[in-house]
Image: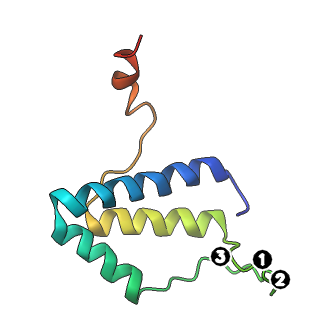
């Protein structure tokens, strides 16, 4: 990944958390995500030609990855992360 990896990790964690939640609370939505995983193979290179090696096989362009995560989030109907969205939870632990 070529930019702001930790914010992208947050976005992926958000998708995983909502997917796990939906497996119990909204199985239809989690099944839609399963279908996307099985059938859609987006180009996440952003036009970059990464070295063809085992080490570089999982490299993605940060902008292309962020765009795809946003598209998936919108299509499935999950909530996007926003700055300080969990601040009220943190306040309860003080």
The residue sitting at the top extreme is: 94
Residue at position x 61%, y 64% from top? Answer: 63
Q: Label 1's element?
A: loop
Position of residue 57 relative to residue 29, above or below, is below
Q: Nearer the viewer, residue 48 or 33?
A: 33
Residue at position x 50%, y 66% from top? Answer: 67
Nearest-to-viewer mark from 3 and 2: 2
Question: As drawn, is 41 to the left or to the right of 16?
Answer: right
- The picture places residue 18, in percent across and down from the top left corner, at 32, 55
Residue at image mark 2: 51
- The picture places residue 39, in percent across and down from the top left corner, at 39, 89
How far apart marks 2 and 1 lie (CA) works out to 6 Å
Image quadrant assignment for residue 38: bottom left
How far apart marks 3 and 2 lie (CA) works out to 14 Å
Position of residue 18 relative to residue 41, above or below, is above
First-in-chain label (3 vs 2): 3
- The picture places residue 91, in percent across and down from the top left corner, at 38, 16
Q: What numbered label is drawn on residue 46?
A: 3
Q: Quadrant of the N terminus?
A: bottom right
First-in-chain label (1 vs 3): 3
Residue at position x 56%, y 53% from top? Answer: 9
Q: Quadrant of the C terminus?
A: top left
Q: What numbered label is drawn on residue 11?
A: none
Colouring rule applied to residues: rainbow
How far apart marks 1 and 3 lie (CA) works out to 14 Å
Q: What numbered label is drawn on residue 56?
A: 1
The residue sitting at the front extreme is: 24
Q: Judge the density around disc 2: few (<14), some (14-19), many (≥20) Cα neighbours within 10 Å.
A: few
Position of residue 94 relative to residue 6, above or below, is above
């Amino acid at each position: 990944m070529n930019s702001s990896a930790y914010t992208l990790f947050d976005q992926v964690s958000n998708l995983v958390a909502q997917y796990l939640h939906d497996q119990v609370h909204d199985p239809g939505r989690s099944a839609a995500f399963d279908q996307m995983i099985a059938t859609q193979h987006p180009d996440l290179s952003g036009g970059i030609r990464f070295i063809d090696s085992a080490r570089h096989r999982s490299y993605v362009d940060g902008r292309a990855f962020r765009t795809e995560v946003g598209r998936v989030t919108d299509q499935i109907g999950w909530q996007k992360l926003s700055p300080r969205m969990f601040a009220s939870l943190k306040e309860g632990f003080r």
